[in-house]
Amino acid sequence: MTSVVPDGISPVAVDKAIEKLTAELGAESVVTAREDLLEFRDPYAYRESDEFDASAMVLPTTTEQVQAITRIAGEYGVPLWTFSQGRNNTYGGPAPRLRGSVLVNLRKMNRILEIDTDLAYAVVEPGVRWFDLHEALEREGGELWASIPDLGWGSVIGNSLEYGIGYTPYGDHARNICGLEVVLPDGSLLRTGMGAMDGNPARHTYPHSYGPSVAGLFQQSNLGIVTSTGWWLMRRPETYLAGWARFHGYEALGAVVDGLRGLLLDRTIENHPMFTRGYEVDENGVGHLNPDGDGWVVRFALYGRQPVVDAQYRTIEATLGRLPGVELAKRVFSGTDLTGPANHDERVQRGIPDMDLLDPQMLPYGADTGHLDFSPVGPATGDAVVRTEQLVRSIYARQGRAYVNGIFLTPRSALHISTTFFDPRDEQETEAVYANYSELVHELAKTGYAPYRTNLAHMDLVADQFGFGDHAQLRFAEKLKDALDPRGILAPGKSGIWPATLRPGRDRDSEQ
Ligand SMILES: Cc1cc2nc3c(=O)[nH]c(=O)nc-3n(C[C@H](O)[C@H](O)[C@H](O)COP(=O)(O)OP(=O)(O)OC[C@H]3O[C@@H](n4cnc5c(N)ncnc54)[C@H](O)[C@@H]3O)c2cc1C
């Protein structure tokens, strides 16, 4: 009998559901042993905490099995929590928001169903990692590149559903999704966009629907389990240029942000520049943390035909290069050169996945280092970016915590990603870091900012910040939740969206 049960669900119901799931999937695809499930805790929560423990885990291999799982869960009212690779570290890892949920681990659904070189897309299942996609694209001749995040072990689908970010011109990963296949809470199957029509050849090439587009309802949501998607890729360019600008101080930061925004808006630069502070790469390409350092570096990249890239770089020199205290550097590669891009910055903007960034992040406490990322989003003006950086820095200073900093720049917005490090074996320190995060949320909310993505413990708090119209957006999501998933079986609490039975009291006079 399972000892971890969700609130309000009887242990007998959970056991019966597990029995039925075992009959459906086979014993080898159902995990109930406590010691095996511990591996699927959030690695950055307090190590001994059982607050986000799962009751069991299932590993389906087909869409039909995912449908059967949701039907069985619905029958017994047992909540599920889905992950694709479950590497969502710093935002909860593989762990469920609601203790006692059954994990739906999609790592075994890892087929690349199609690569279309002419139309530059792939169709992937949820278990496909960045490493897998890159390898498959290279096997096909390397004519297509995938935008990738900093760590290669995550999944294309899990990352993209979370609005994950990468560093080629296709770096807004949610936008690469085209043609989802989704299992709904009642076990039925839905295909979005042109895929809603049998045999439609534009299923993975045209992103909108006839009528309202529903694909977005499955991102950062708990309305379905995505079993495949089309995902857009970029064509290999003739030339790839990895560039950097280095500078010190807030005045230069503001000027570089404004300069880069202009270059992004006029499409001289088409990828997503990433600023870092507190993390330095030495002459051997090895990264080191230096939270006290006041040096900034921003990486960016150019892609295209050689004369065009040359002209674009001259424009960058004439814009950023003339700013006082800004030093520019570049390395240029042929598009077919796989081994030339040697350091992480060069590889990640070229779509070659690695795990290099994890090592320096493990320095403070060794393999047990925990980190918590705070990622509010604001507009991409120099003034706004500098004000936000100063505010965040002053809060961390008051809390007495060191952190490293990243700013992901798009033509109109800036994601401010600050990472603080702690020892998750230390209960008090972990609690203090999580309390500090709440303070950051409250303080930034006073300036109108909120995180674009958050960890399990802060999902409700972040949802609370979106209060316009008496939380009209959240109430809309809740209405959909009640209609599509009346028993509340899919990921209760994800993004602060709870089923009616578990909904926290909120002052909603106008609720009807
Ligand atoms: C050092 C470091 C660097 C990082 N760099 C980046 C970066 O550059 N860019 C970035 O975006 N992130 C980054 N991250 C955050 C995170 O590690 C990645 O986003 C990672 O890819 C997420 O894990 P995953 O892909 O395995 O997603 P998963 O853990 O599989 O999924 C994430 C969430 O999506 C939902 N979900 C997943 N699959 C499904 C499905 N099939 N159906 C319905 N819902 C689903 C679930 O709610 C799940 O919790 C970084 C983290 C660290 C620690």
Image (cartoon, helix red, strand yellow):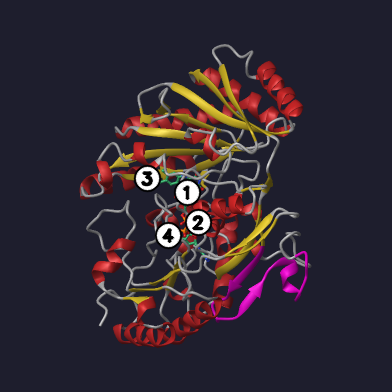
Residue at 42%, 66% (x, y): give it.
Answer: 504
Q: Is residue 387 left or right of residue 101?
A: right
| C-alpha gap between disc 4 and disc 3 | 16 Å
Q: CA distance from mark 3 to mark 1?
A: 19 Å
Does the CB distance between marks 4 and 3 fall below 8 Å?
no
Q: What residue is pinned by disc 1?
A: 152
Name the residue tied to disc 3: 372
Q: What's the distance in space between the residues labelled 4 and 1, CA to CA?
A: 13 Å
Depth check: 95 or 169 in front? 169
Image quarter of the N terminus: bottom left
Label 4 within 8 A of ligand 1 by Cβ: yes
Query: How far, Cα to Cα, is label 1 from label 2?
Result: 7 Å
Residue highlighted by disc 2: 129
Taking the image as shown, residue 84 lies to the left or right of residue 168, namely: left
Residue 467 visible in the displayed image: no
The nearer-to-camera label among 3 and 2 is: 2
**276 versus 255 height, above or below:** below
- Judging depth in this view, the residue of 188 and 30 nearest the camera is 30
Check disc 2 and report its element: helix, strand or loop: loop
Identify the mark nearer the N-term, 4 or 2.
4
The answer to whether the beta carbon of the residue marked 2 is less than 8 Å from any atom of ligand 1 is yes
In the rendered view, tell whether residue 409 sits above or below residue 175: above
Please give left or right for residue 293 compared with residue 452 in the image.
Answer: left
Q: In the image, is residue 191 part of the stretch drawn in magenta?
A: yes
- In percent of width and height, residue 55 lies at 32, 73
Neighbourhood count class around disc 2 (C-alpha, 10 Å): few under 14, some 14–19, many 20 upward? many
- Residue at 45% x, 85% y is 72
- Residue 38 in percent (x, y) is at 28, 64
